[in-house]
Image (cartoon, helix red, strand yellow):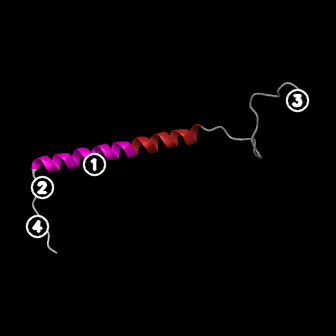
Amino acid sequence: MRYLRNRPNRSETLCAAVMASGLAAGVGLVAFYLTRIFLAREPTGGVGVERLDGPQAGER
């Protein structure tokens, strides 16, 4: 099987550039959003976690 290869014209090149830019922007936004979510999490009550707000009602 043979394929005939034509050089892409200006509109095909522009379309590919726009689609690649949109895909790159989408991947970048998702990566930024997920990173922001992971960095904004508060630690759970594990070993070595100190409380900064002091004792609560009923604690001493």
- What's the distance in space between the residues labelled 2 and 3, CA to CA? 73 Å
Badge nearest the viewer, 1 or 3: 1
Of labels 3 and 4, earlier in sequence is 4
- What's the distance in space between the residues labelled 1 and 3, CA to CA? 57 Å
Q: Residues within 10 Å of mark 1 (few under 14, many from 20)?
A: few
The disc at residue 8 is 2
- What's the distance in space between the residues labelled 3 and 4, CA to CA? 79 Å
* 25 part of magenta stretch: yes
What kind of residue is marked 4?
Leu
| Residue 37, x across and y down, in percent | 55, 39
Of labels 2 and 3, earlier in sequence is 2
Q: Residues within 10 Å of mark 2 (few under 14, many from 20)?
A: few
Q: Is residue 22 left or right of residue 13?
A: right
User: Dots 1 and 3: beta carbons under 8 Å?
Assistant: no
What kind of residue is marked 3?
Glu
Of all residues shown, which one is farthest toward the bottom?
1
Query: Which residue is at the front of the view, 52 or 32?
Result: 32
Q: Residue at x 12, y 46 (%)?
A: 11
Of all residues shown, which one is farthest toward the front?
1
Q: Is residue 2 left or right of residue 19?
A: left
| Residue 3, x across and y down, in percent | 14, 69
Residue matched to label 3: 59
Residue matched to label 1: 20
What kind of residue is marked 2?
Pro
Q: Residues within 10 Å of mark 3 (few under 14, many from 20)?
A: few
The stretch in magenta equals: 10-27
- What's the distance in space between the residues labelled 4 and 2, CA to CA? 12 Å
